[in-house]
Amino acid sequence: MGEAVTCAALARSYSRRCPECDFSWAISVGNAINLVAAAPTRLRMAFSASGEQLARTPTVLPWAAVSYLWHLADVLRICAERFWALSHDPEAAIVAYDSEQLAEARGYAQQSTAAGLWALERATGDWLAAAATVHVGDPYRHPEFGQLTVADVLRMIAHEVEHHARDIQRCLNGG
Ligand SMILES: [Zn+2]
């Protein structure tokens, strides 16, 4: 399951578009935030259009749809906490975590789709609130990618959403 690693590599690349999902790194910060804000409704519609069985069916992708859903919910939750720390406790370290290990520890593949959609909605709300407490030009010391700005991180999260929303759609369409 190398999907998270792939995302990291793509985020680090300087190409203007993601070769897999066509996300443009030239996206404005406002549009990046809007893309994230739209994720809960977008994914709720995608999952409601398919049966529960399809959410768990293995495809050519590393994970099934339900796992990508829980991954996104956790990515947004963790990023919200990091933004909050940056604005309220700027000396605190931004602590790295391993997406693959988190997926394993949380048992994404066995989790509820309904609860995942709820978790994503809650995490997105908290992410938007936390993002409003930081400034786009603020320095952000990313544990994997080094010195970035908040604007870079907003775009990275928008890419996570776009990339995995497409993964989910592919899974639900049968790969
Ligand atoms: Zn992508």
Image (cartoon, grey):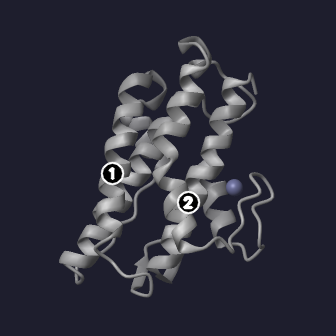
**Ligand 1 quadrant in view:** bottom right
Camera-nearest residue between 64 and 157: 157
Q: Which residue is drawn at 41% across and 87% down?
A: 139
Quadrant position of residue 158: bottom right
Say whether residue 38 is visible.
Answer: yes
User: Which residue is at 44% across, 81% downward?
Assistant: 136
Left-right relation of 18 to 92: right
Figure label count: 2
Q: Which label belongs to residue 151?
A: none
Q: Position of residue 107 (x, y in %)?
A: 41, 30
Q: Do residues under tags 1 and 2 come within 8 Å of each other at their CB atoms?
A: no
Mark 1 closeness class: few <14, some 14–19, many ≥20 residues within 10 Å: some
What amino acid does circle 1 point to?
Gly
Q: Residue 125 carries which label?
A: 1
Position above or below: 148 against 75: below
Label 1, label 2: how far apart the Cα atoms are: 14 Å
In the picture, the disc for residue 158 is 2
Q: In this view, does 15 lie above or below 102?
A: below
Q: Is residue 99 left or right of residue 57?
A: left
Residue shown at 53% from the left, 73% from the top: 29
Q: Where is residue 75 in the image (x, y as percent from the top left)?
A: 43, 52
Q: Where is residue 83 in the image (x, y as percent from the top left)?
A: 32, 69
Q: Is mark 1 on a helix, strand or loop?
A: helix
Q: Is residue 159 left or right of residue 76?
A: right
Q: Does the residue labelled 2 lie within 8 Å of ligand 1?
A: no
